[in-house]
Image (tube, rainbow, N blue to C red):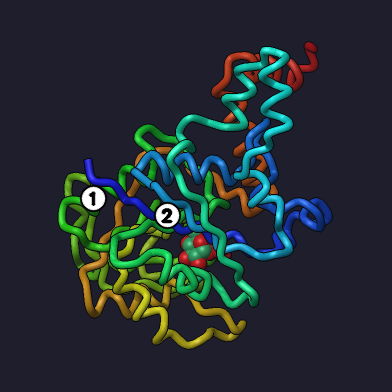
Amino acid sequence: MMKIKKAVLPVAGFGTRFLPATKAIPKEMLTIIDKPLIEYAVEEAISAGAEEIIFITSYTKPAIKNYFSRVPELEKQLKSTGKIELLEKIQPKIFENVKFTYINQKEQKGLGHAILLAEEAVGSDAFSVLLPDDLFISTPSCLEQIRDSYSQNLQPTIAVNRIDKNNIHKYGVVDLGGNQLNKTNTAVISNIIEKPHASVAPSDIAVAGRYIFNPTIFECIKKVEADNSGEIQITDAIKLLTKIENVQVKIFDGEKYDCGSKDGYLEATIAVAMKDPYYSNKIKKIITGKL
Ligand code: G1P
């Protein structure tokens, strides 16, 4: 199985939708039950073969770096008190050979700008981009699914799903330009538009926060001009990329929760809890008032 060895996670945003919590806690560190949102994305990156996780972060969010660093005092205490399962939780085996790299994004100039900061760290291989706001529940993981499409032809691959008209303006939306989805639900796109009004959206197929790129994307990002809000959008760079390489999308199998919004975050918490027999029982009792 092909490995996508480097993963870029843009995590520099202020998370204003979650104020006041995000005044002191990065949005990505908010937990779904007991695990921070960001760890789900890191696990997903590793599932597709990541050996280096490149965080594009801000010096105002030291908690992320702290989280992925070891805490010898805590490890010692858990060992001496025999709490081995907690030891495994704070230092998961799958992290053992993974390098964590932190790049400071000084200005908030958009997703494209954040990804471009990873250029040197990425080097010459294909890499993934995971937006930790989007939480996926699926086996195989969403990134593994798009990795499998990528490995067929080495064409940049983006995870997508169908979105109803009322919500389409929140996403990058793709145009298949007459191309058909094949039997693995993959198709080459002819265009992509960032957050179009429903009346001009080219389809109901929207970008979910998982991408695999070749380093050619960096040259495209460099050519993109900032939009009206001063942001360099990755979507605009992908639009340029379609002129150079075939860019394909894959409709992933599984559930996706938009934890960038409070309702999505709440839904994700409930969805994850409902998959656990203990918590699902508890929730049912809370809802029916039978505690
Ligand atoms: C970003 C991208 C958008 C994509 C979305 C997926 O938007 O710009 O194209 O559809 O992630 O979550 P954001 O959610 O950061 O506004």
* Label 1 packing within 10 angstroms: few (<14), some (14-19), many (20+): many
In the depicted structure, whether residue 274 falls above or below residue 258: above
- Residue at image mark 1: 149
Question: Where residue 22 sits in the image (x, y, percent)?
Answer: 77, 55
Question: Where residue 17 sits in the image (x, y, percent)?
Answer: 73, 59
In the depicted structure, whether residue 52 falls above or below residue 106: above
Residue 272 picture quarter: top right
Q: Is the N terminus in the top left, top right, bottom left or bottom right quadrant? A: top left
- At a point 39% along the width and 47% down the height, the residue shown is 51
* Label 2 packing within 10 angstroms: few (<14), some (14-19), many (20+): many
- At a point 66% along the width and 19% down the height, the residue shown is 79
Question: Where residue 255 sits in the image (x, y, percent)?
Answer: 46, 39
In the depicted structure, whether residue 35 falls above or below residue 191: above
Q: Is the C terminus in the top left, top right, bottom left or bottom right quadrant? A: top right
Question: Where residue 153 sits in the image (x, y, percent)?
Answer: 16, 57
- At a point 49% along the width and 72% down the height, the residue shown is 117
> Which secondary structure lies at badge 2?
strand
> Which secondary structure lies at badge 1?
helix
Amino acid type, callout 1: Ser
- Residue at image mark 2: 7
- Residue 162 visible? The answer is yes
Tag count in the figure? 2
Sequence-wise, the earlier of marks 1 and 2 is: 2
Give whichever of 206, 165 is nearer the camera.
206
Q: Label 1 vs label 2: CA separation?
A: 17 Å
- At a point 41% along the width and 79% down the height, the residue shown is 221
- Residue 168 visible? The answer is no
Residue 7 picture quarter: bottom left
132 vs 290, left or right, is left
- Front: mark 1 or 2: 2
5 vs 248, left or right, is right
